[in-house]
């Protein structure tokens, strides 16, 4: 973290603060009780709603809040953003009416049938990663397992070399985590991302294949091919969002089970609970907070918001709101009613939810089948990512039983 420490999150909110990164949930609860929409002068002005009601209202209000850039950083909002309605990474950064058009282009690739067709590939990948761990008593579940699963899937879908995984994860770090860098440094750090994606586009244009990049280059809107900026932004979105979110969600699930042996034993004995457990892990440890920009000066729930103020749209906070969920601070792997917002709310709800659920389910199923008993190894620290996607980056686990 490069920013000074936060003294009061209600008036000086910062999602890169060490306290928030280490454990945001007590901070969410405190803010929800005394200041449900926190504020900060950092990043050029920022508001952070902590209730389900406020998060949902903002996520569904595309008139007063624009999505044209969705990663909070030190640059003044809008300086490096394409104008609405396209945004920097369509469709996640697109406003209506363009959003619906851009989203519709991608929907076929993430429908249940093509995602189900990837199940065998995903299972083989998970088993290979588990095999590579050998007989070690202590493993790093993030470094050796969870970070590789979404990389393998996204590389396959985009037709990119899986051996570029370290590069993809560096893109995640640059775009999602390094938001507290000075603007000039962040722009310079983005250069390798631009260089890589531009080269991929040029290669596929010269030699199309059966992959998502070629599909995007062949797609049309109103009889016209997608602009290079549109294709570029969407590829960056698929690489970054497709990797970081699922990596974090799987890791948080294993982190929970490593500290809750009763839940682990129940899943081992009753694998039919896994679907509801996946939904509960998504609710309790939702990895993603999005961002919006205020379109014009106006007052929202008593808050005098200014044009281009950031909104830190915390779906994790919404999922922990006791007014929206019974026993909201408890992880109940057999929770029956679970309308969580881990995949977002409103028109920008994650179009990759089918893929994420499939990856999580298979990754956890294979991990538990191989390691029916394990625990957190506290001799080394578990570390979490900073920024708008939260998940374990170092996750030392001691294996107590293996199959």
Image (tube, helix red, strand yellow):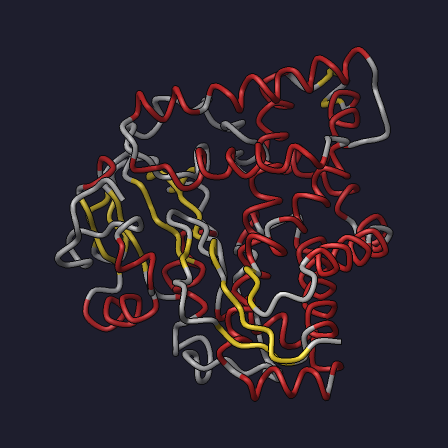
Residue at 57% across, 56% down: 343
Q: Quadrant of the C terminus?
A: bottom right
Tell me where residue 44 sits by quadrant.
top left
Tell me where residue 265 sits by quadrant.
bottom right
Residue at 42% across, 37% down: 66
Residue 110 at least partly seen: yes
Tell me where residue 23 sits by quadrant.
bottom left
Left or right of 66: which side holds 244? Answer: right
Residue at 30% across, 58% down: 20
Q: Position of residue 274 (x, y in %)?
A: 69, 76
Nearer the observer, 56 or 296: 56
Residue at 54% across, 20% down: 194
Q: Is residue 74 above or below residue 108?
A: above
Report how many numbered discs are placed on residues in the image.
0
Nearer the observer, 259 or 240: 259
Q: Quadrant of the N terminus?
A: top left
Left or right of 34: which side holds 23? Answer: right
Q: Position of residue 241 (x, y in %)?
A: 57, 43
Residue 246 at least partly seen: no
Left or right of 179: which side holds 273? Answer: right
Q: Position of residue 360 (x, y in %)?
A: 67, 62
Q: Is residue 294 above or below residue 209?
A: below
Q: Position of residue 367 (x, y in %)?
A: 69, 68
Q: Is residue 354 above or below residue 338?
A: above
Nearer the observer, 3 or 75: 3
């Amino acid at each position: 973290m490069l920013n000074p420490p936060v003294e009061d999150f209600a008036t000086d909110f910062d999602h890169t603060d060490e306290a928030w990164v280490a454990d945001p949930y007590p901070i969410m609860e405190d803010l929800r009780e005394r200041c449900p929409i926190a504020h900060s002068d950092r990043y050029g002005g920022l508001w952070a709603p902590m209730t389900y009601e406020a998060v949902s209202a903002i996520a569904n209000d595309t008139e007063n809040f624009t999505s044209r850039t969705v990663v909070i950083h030190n640059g003044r909002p809008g300086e490096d953003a394409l104008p609405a309605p396209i945004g920097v990474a369509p469709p996640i950064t697109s406003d209506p009416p363009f959003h619906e058009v851009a989203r519709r282009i991608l929907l076929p690739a993430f429908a249940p049938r093509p995602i189900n067709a990837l199940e065998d590939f995903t299972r083989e990948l998970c088993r290979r990663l588990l095999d590579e761990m050998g007989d070690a008593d202590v493993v790093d579940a993030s470094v050796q397992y969870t970070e590789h699963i979404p990389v393998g899937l996204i590389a396959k879908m985009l037709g990119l070399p899986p051996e570029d995984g370290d590069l993809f994860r560096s893109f995640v770090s640059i775009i999602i985590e390094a938001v507290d860098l000075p603007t000039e440094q962040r722009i310079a750090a983005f250069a390798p991302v631009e260089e890589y994606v531009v080269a991929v586009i040029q290669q596929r244009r010269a030699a199309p294949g059966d992959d998502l990049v070629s599909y995007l280059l062949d797609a049309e809107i109103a009889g016209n091919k997608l602009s290079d900026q549109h294709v570029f932004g969407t590829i960056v979105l698929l690489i970054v969002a497709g990797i970081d979110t699922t990596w974090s969600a799987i890791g948080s699930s294993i982190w929970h089970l490593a500290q809750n042996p009763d839940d682990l034993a129940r899943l081992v004995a009753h694998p039919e609970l896994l679907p509801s457990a996946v939904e509960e892990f998504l609710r309790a440890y939702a990895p993603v907070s999005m961002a919006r920009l205020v379109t014009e000066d106006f007052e929202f729930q008593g808050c005098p918001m200014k044009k281009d103020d950031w909104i830190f749209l915390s779906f994790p906070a919404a999922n922990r709101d006791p007014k929206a969920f019974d026993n909201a601070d408890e992880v109940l792997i057999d929770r029956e009613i679970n309308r969580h917002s881990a995949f977002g709310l409103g028109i920008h709800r994650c179009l990759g939810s089918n893929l994420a659920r499939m990856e999580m389910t298979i990754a956890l199923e294979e991990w538990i089948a191989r390691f029916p008993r394990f625990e957190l190894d506290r001799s080394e620290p578990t570390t979490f990512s900073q920024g708008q996607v939260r998940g374990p980056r170092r996750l030392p686990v001691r294996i107590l039983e293996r199959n």
